[in-house]
Image: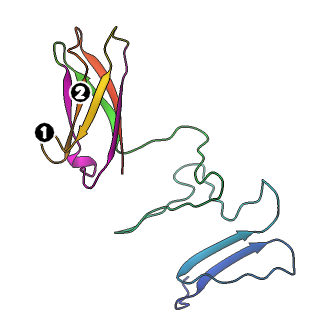
Amino acid sequence: MSWHVGNGTAIAGYTGASDDTVTPRPNTAILGIASQNASTARGVVGVTTVGQGVRGDATTGVGGYFTATGTALQVAGKAAFSRSGRAPVPRGRAHVDVDLGTKGGLSGTPLCFANLLYYRSGVHVAAVRPNYPTAGKMRIHLNRAVTAATNVAWVVLG
């Protein structure tokens, strides 16, 4: 089943006071509004036992965008990021290079973070340098060489 509405709203769902009016949003396929003044009000809910309850895909735009005067995104449970992982720093080395070519690369000015997964006395992550030693890679620098192989966890935002 499909509808063509032009530049308006194709499907609108509304719950709240009967005298409230719903203003269609331009270029919106599905609009969900919950105007109750309650912390349990939900504009859109997606539920599934297997799979994805809600999914946003975009070819060149943003797959999901959230705005709020309070918290824009809250996660209850685990969060998974496609641009994160672990990298082993070999014994006797003070850095490791991570290739992000298959994970979206490193264009623009990404924020790169890393931390040790093992305690090594006097050793810490000193810096993470994006697009070094070559474009699409990042180098995780430790303040000194490790005396045993040491994993670092990393994440890239942006």
Query: Which residue is disc 1 drawn over?
Result: 133
Q: Residues within 10 Å of mark 1 (few under 14, many from 20)?
A: few
Residue 103 counted in the magenta span: yes
Q: If the image is split into quadrants, where does the N terminus sit?
A: bottom right
Q: Is residue 45 above or below residue 154?
A: below
Residue 34 counted in the magenta span: no
**Type of amino acid at the residue the image marks with label 2:** His
Q: Is residue 85 above or below residue 19?
A: above
Disc number placed over residue 105 in the picture, else none:
none
**In terms of secondary structure, where does tag 2 sit?**
strand
User: Gap in Å between the C-alphas at discs 1 and 2?
Assistant: 12 Å
- In the image, what residue occupies the spot 73% across and 81% down? 22
- In the image, what residue occupies the spot 44% across and 63% down? 63
- In the image, what residue occupies the spot 55% across and 60% down? 66
Q: Is residue 81 above or below residue 21?
A: above
Number of numbered tags placed on the structure image: 2
How far from the left and from the top, in percent, is residue 78? Answer: 53, 37
| Residue 53 shown left or right of residue 142 in the figure | right
How far from the left and from the top, in percent, is residue 40? Answer: 78, 54
Q: Is residue 118 above or below residue 110?
A: above
Q: Residues within 10 Å of mark 2 (few under 14, many from 20)?
A: many
Choose between 126 and 27: the one closer to the eye.
126
What colouring style does the render use?
A: rainbow
Query: Which residue is disc 2 drawn over?
Result: 141
**In terms of secondary structure, where does tag 1 sit?**
loop
**Type of amino acid at the residue the image marks with label 1:** Pro
- In the image, what residue occupies the spot 34% across and 31% down? 114
